[in-house]
Amino acid sequence: MFFLVCCGSDDPASKDPAADDPSSEDVDYSDGEYSSGGGSSGGGSNGGSNGVASSSSMKVEAVPAVTDTLIEDTTLVADKNALPECNSKKEGQSFFVEGESTLYFCIEGEWYPSSAVSEVLEISCHGGSLVLNDPDGEKDEEESSGQGQTNPWGAFGGGGNTASALDTMPARRPGAHIVGIAEKGPFRYGTSVKIVELDSTQRLADSRKTHKTCITDAAGNYSFDSVDLVSPYLRVEANGYFYNELTGGLSSGMVTLNAVADVTDRDTVNVNMLTHMEAPRVLKLVENSGNNQPIRSVKAQALKEILASFEISLGGSSGGNNGFPGWGFGQQQATVSTDGRFAEDISLFDGDEYSAALLAISIMMQRNGSGNDMLQYAGGIAERIKGNGNWDDNNAKADLADWLMVLDTSGSYATIRNNMASWKLGDVPDFEKHLRSFWTNIYQFGACNSMTAGTVKHVNNSLSKFFISYYEQPDGPRTRFICDGETHLWRAATDIEKDTVGFGKGEYEGQIKSGVINVDKYYVYEQSKGKWRVATSDDIMEFVDIEEVMDGLAPSDKVIFILRHAERTDDTGKSGHLTAGGKTQSQTVGKKLKGEDIVFANSTYTRSKETCENMATGAGVSYTENTIADLDGEWYVKDESKYESCKSENGGGWGATSAYAYKGICPGVYYDFEDRSEEFVTKIVKPAFSKVKRVGVWISHDTFVVPITVYGSNKKVNLRYFDTKQWIYYLAGIAIIMDSKGNIRYVPVRGLDSGTMTM
C-alpha cells in the first residue's frame, strides 16, 4: 500500500486567474447597434462581456457565436489508458476517467481509484481541487474547528461565529443522510459542499454547526453519509468550478451557489441557480411573517416569483407535507406550490419542465460571463426580487432580451444543447422555449401561431438596443422578426421576408423593387409563381465605369457613349447651364478618355453643349459643336397633345418615362418601345459610326437616356422610378459598341461613382 501524504493539483482553471474577466470585443451587429462590451447588470449598472461575437452574412440570421472564455478541463480522460504518467510532478493529483466515471489519484508512481484511496487517506477539497490528507495528521483548521466560513450573502445574517442555542442542543436528527446535485452547469470534482445549520432563534442566522464534504465526480453529486443535525433549516453551499453550458469547458473562475432548505421531510437538497436566487426572497418572506413561518411554507411562493420574473409559469398547487417524526415543529401548513416542487428538488437533467426552466435561467445568468461577474449579475437580480417578489428593472430585462435574441438568431442555442449533450448526463431539456419566450415577451411580439404566421415585426421596446420607431425606419438596426409558419416560433426574418413586406402581388412579370429595409437589395416578381424572389445578375445589370468599357474594347471596336448631361442649375429650359460642380464632373469624366480622338454630339440645350465642352477639356481635345436634335429627349413621344396628361397620371415625367420603358404605358402617347428604340439605333447611331474613329460621346437628357438605356440592357438596369425611385444619374447612360462586322452590343455605363440616384 501507499503511505505518502500529499496534496496538489494540475487544475487548468486555477492557472488562469485572468480568465474570470473574458475579453470583450466590439460587435458590429445589425448596423453597429449591438456591442458586446458592457451589458446591464441585474441591478441596472453596466457589467462585463456579453459573451457573443459577430461573424457575418445576413445580419442577425447568421452572425454571432458564443465567445465566453473556453477553458478546457485537461484532467478529463476517455479511459484509463489515457491517464498521463504518474510521476513526481503528478503526485497527489487527480484525473477523471470518463469511460469508468471514476476519479483516479496519482500516488507513488501508480494510479488508484478514489474508492481505494479513501480507505487509507482522506480526500478533501480546497481551491476547487481535491487534496489528500493523512487521517492521523493535522486537519484543515476549518474542518477541525467546525467553524463556518463567513457568509457572502448578507441575507443570511452574520451569526456564523456567534454562540447560539444550537451549539449545546443534542442532534434532533442523528445520522442524517443528505444528498444532492450541485449545478450551474454541473459542478466539477474538487468542489466543496458545506452544510451550515441555520438558527431559527436568531432569524435564521448561520450557526457554528457546519458539515463539509467534496464532490468527487463530474456530475455534481455530493453526499453527507451521516451528519447529526440539530436544526431542520440548512444553508447548503457549493464552491468550485462548473462545466459551462455556453462553451462546454470549465467556468472562468470558482463560484459559490447556495440553497436554503427545510429538511423536515427531505434528504435531498440540490444546489443550483434557482435555489441561489430564491434564497434571499425565502428569508425575506420568513422575516415578513415575524419569523413565525417555517421555510417550507414560503418556498413555493419564492420559486414561482423567481420563475415569473423570467416570464416562466409552471405548476399548480399542492397540500402540506408530512414531515419526519421527532422534529416537533408544529402543524404542517398547506402551501401554494409549483406541482409540489421546490427549487432544491430540481436538477438540469430531470427531463421535465422544471429542468428546462432551471437551465434557461442558468443560461440567462451568464449574461456577463461565468465567474464573479455572473454572481454579481445574479445577485443584483435576486436583490431586486427579494423585496416584493418582482424583478422590476426594465432596462436590465431589455438588455438581457437583446443578448438572448443574439444567441438565438446566431444558432448559439444549438451550441449550448450540443455542449450539454456531450457531457452524457441525460437528456437536455427544452430550455430554448423559455429563452425565446423571455425575449419575445420583452419585445412585445405577442403569440406566434397559425393566426399570426408570416407576420413580420420590429422591436418597439424603446429600452432595447434594437428599437426602432417604425418598421421602415431607414436608420438604426435592420433587424426584423417573423412568426415562422412551420415552427410557430419567432425568429429573425431573412432579407427577402423583411424587405418584401407590403409588396403584395406584383403588377407584371419581372417587376423589380428595392427592399423595404435593405434599399440596396432588389427583388423580382415571377408572375407564373405569384412570388417575389431575390434578384440575380441575370435580372439586373450594373452600370460599368467608362474606363472599364474602354479597357474591354477590341482593337477594331468602336463605341458611342450616350450619356445624360452633368449637374445642371434649377433652370430646366433650353438655356439652362451646368453648375460649377457639373463642369467639374464633366472634366473628371473627360480625363478617363484622355488620348482618344473623340467625336462629340450635343442636343439643342445649352447644358448638353457645356457638358461636351468640359469633357473635351478634361480629355485634352478640342470640341466642335455637333448638334443632333433627336437627342433633345422627345424621341419616344408620339402625341405631344396627350403627353402632359400621361405625365400627370403617372407621377410626372420621370414616372411616366420609366413606366413606359418597362411597362409600355400610354400607348397612344408613346411609340412602340422596341420599334422606336431599334429605329434610333439603326437610323441614327449606326450611320454615325462611319464618322467615329474609336470613341463618340453624345450628351442627351434623362427622358431619352432612360428609355434607350433600358432598351440596351434588355430592361435589366434598375431605372424604375415609378417603382423603386431609381433614376439615371449625371453622365450615365448606355455604351453602344460596334465590332468590325457591324454587330452591336450594349453596356450600361457610368462616368461617375454611380449610374443611378434614388429620388
Image: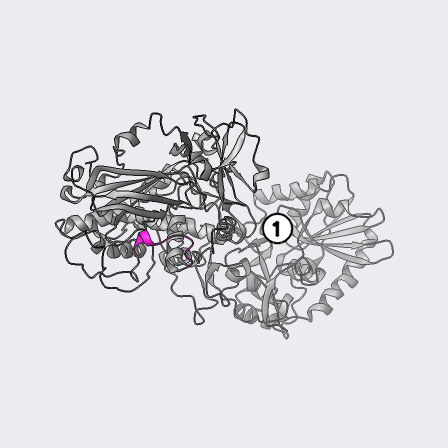
Q: Position of residue 324 (x, y in %)?
A: 23, 55
Q: Answer yes or no: is residue 24 visible.
A: no
User: Which quadrant would residue 311 be assigned to in this image?
Assistant: bottom left
Q: In this view, does 503 lie to the left or right of 359?
A: right
Q: Is residue 349 magenta?
A: yes
532 and 481: which is toward the camera: 481
Q: Is residue 117 magenta?
A: no
User: Which quadrant would residue 468 be assigned to in this image?
Assistant: bottom left
> Magenta segment, principal secondary structure?
loop
Seen at 23% across and 61% down, the residue is: 336
* Kind of residue indicated by mark 1: Tyr
Q: Where is residue 400 in the image (x, y as percent from the top left)?
A: 38, 49
Q: Position of residue 670 (x, y in %)?
A: 65, 70
Seen at 42% across and 66% down, the residue is: 448
The answer to whether 743 is drawn above or below residue 40 in the figure is below
103 and 429: which is toward the camera: 103
617 and 82: which is toward the camera: 82
Q: In this view, does 347 lie to the left or right of 758?
A: left
Seen at 53% across and 63% down, the residue is: 500
Mark 1, Cα crowd under 10 Å, few <14 / some 14-19 / many 20+, is many
The answer to whether 430 is drawn above or below residue 171 in the figure is below
411 and 497: which is toward the camera: 411
Q: Answer yes or no: is residue 159 visible.
A: yes
User: Which quadrant would residue 356 be assigned to in this image?
Assistant: bottom left
Q: Where is residue 362 in the image (x, y as percent from the top left)?
A: 38, 49
- Highlighted range, magenta: 342-351
Residue found farthest to the front? 1
Instruction: From the image, tell me which residue sits under label 1.
Output: 730
Q: In this view, does 19 lie to the left or right of 144?
A: right
Q: Is mark 1 on a helix, strand or loop?
A: loop
